[in-house]
Image (spheres, grey):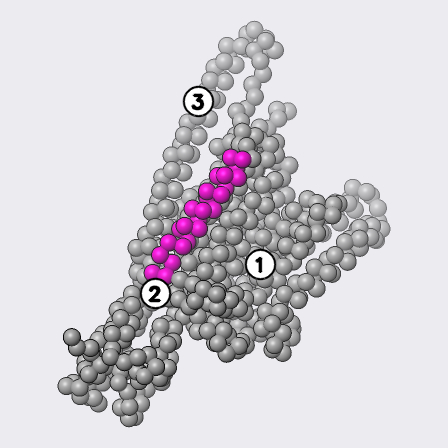
Amino acid sequence: MQKSPYNDSNDSTNSSELSDTKYRLLGLLIVLFALALRLFELGERVLHHDESVHGSFTLKLLEQGEYSYNPAYHGPFLFHSTAAVFHFLGISDATARLVPVFFGVATILALFLLKKELGKSGVLWSMFLLAFSPSMVYFSRFFRNDMIIVFCTLAAVAGAFRYLDNIHSFRRYPYLILTASSLALAVTAKENAYVIILIFGAYAGMGLLYWIYSSWKKENLSLQKTLLRKASVLLHFLPEILLSGALSIFIIMFFYTSLFRNDISLFSIVDRAFTHWMAMHRIERIGGPFYYYIPILLLYEVPIVIFGAAGFFHFLKIKRPNASFFFFLCYWALTSLLLYSYLQEKVPWLVVHIVLPFGILAGAYLGEIFSRKPEPVPPEQELPEGDRSSLTGLTSSRKEYSRKALNLTAGILALTLLISLGQCISVNYYRSMEPAELMTYTQSSPDIRELMENIESFDRRPETLRLYVVDPNKLYWPLPWYLRDYEKVGYTSKPPSSSKYEAIIVPSSYDMYREISAEEYSSYNFTLRPGRDFTLYYKKKLEKTG
């Protein structure tokens, strides 16, 4: 039977012409490109209301040392790490987003650990696609926990495969630590870490069962003897597995107890997380159709969708030495898409957990396609003379077909990359606060910048201005973040009975001129976020003259 041209390992065939120096240099350039995209005008976009809540919690931790776990606002790691950033670099919209930037870039770097499976070209293509993926860039510039989870997920996968690769060597220990600490850090970041552990745990369990079953059939022993043999093998690794479990628990408790200052049990952490988020799933707090993420993927992630899907079917079909890794990668991509589509908490930032495995699949596929060696053809002298002319024609037609297929693939890739890059620039720098963008879910309005300019122009210092913010639904975020330096600001569900204020912000439906004098107060209308219009009323004497 003819040997398939795909049977060689990725690292040897796909990257044989790419030197280590060139590989590292290209990788470094991609990382710098990713960093530049994520840092450029980082503080320009007004903080989303979720970001402002996270910022306010972080300030409370930094200034008062107070933290208490509430699953509605996710885990403690983001608050503690950002508090350190605020302490050393100051408090601003830009510094609030530095932790997601760091983990977004670290995700790109972590792909270097998968060189054996993806090959050099596959690693570089995966890095490149994820470096300017519109959703990856957008949520790396967003003060949320998801990029921490994305990094931890990839680091755990890379650590697990490197651990198995060095299973009989002492070099396995750093990779075991990487895997254990990454999963623990994910648990301290956000509750969808349990979804990831479920995905990976189910795969590991099925792999373990297959390992036992195949040995049982192959060795022709009783099931009991087979189980005893396998148990004795696993027993050798039990101490290091238990130690890594202890390390994970230490990391989890370190953050959830706020550096061992609070009293909370591991059982309570898990119970609160599951109780809250299962309730949110049941009531469909932010529900949506099963296909919710498909329009987002098709609009922003065209190259990853097309070549990720191509890679999915390609790697399931073609046999290769690293088949187990690619089978896992396909499983990871498919289960992520299905699980997040099923869960009734439909928000745009969760799309990054689907983009990650599909982005790696797309990168691996492109790395193989554009590094593929031509299929070897037998020399003419080895064939009967009558077959030589037909061989020449067959070889020519194969080369022509391969050339046309490669050119078509390159054309589609170039077009989709241009579309994706255009979307990346548009949604991150020009339309980052546009309600029409699918990525900008309930994004705060740019009007808030003008509002703050008006307030800051008042003839009052932040510690003396008497200001009230009124909203019966208490949905006035991100105003508490931007008014954090105003010591006499008050937040109420209805206007105070006495007019002991110099300025007041109320929903636009309130006509405050029925209670206050139009001769004494001026007003300014602004949008807080889509569907939330407010009015600032302020005493005219606050306006600076001259």
Q: Is residue 41 magenta?
A: yes
Q: Residue at position x 80%, y 55% from top?
A: 235
Q: Main secondary structure of the magenta part?
A: helix
What amino acid type is highlighted by mark number 1?
Ile
What amino acid type is highlighted by mark number 3?
Glu
Above or below residue 24? Residue 273 is below
Residue where numbered disc 3 is placed: 400
Where residue 57 appears, as percent x and y from the top left, is 47, 74
Residue 437, picture quadrant: bottom left
Q: Quadrant of the C terminus?
A: bottom left
Where residue 180 appears, as percent x and y from the top left, is 65, 58
In the displayed structure, does residue 94 sit left or right of residue 501?
Answer: right
* Badge 3 element: helix
Residue at the limit of the structure toward the top, as seen here:
385
Which label's residue is closer to the chain start, 3 or 1? 1
Mark 1 crowdedness (10 Å alpha carbons): few <14, some 14-19, many ≥20? many
Above or below residue 6? Residue 489 is below
The reply to whether discs 3 and 2 touch (Cβ–Cβ < 8 Å) is no
**Disc on res. 196:** 1
Give the magenta range.
21-46
Tell me the mark number nearer the camera, choosing from 2 and 1: 2
| Residue 126 can be seen in this image | yes
Which label's residue is closer to the chain start, 3 or 2? 2
Q: Nearer the viewer, residue 461 or 321?
A: 461
Residue 12, picture quadrant: top right
**Disc on res. 46:** 2
| Residue 437 can be seen in this image | no
Real-space Cα separation, disc 3 to disc 2, in angstroms: 53 Å
* Badge 1 element: helix
Which label's residue is closer to the chain start, 2 or 1? 2
* Badge 2 element: loop
**Disc on res. 491:** none
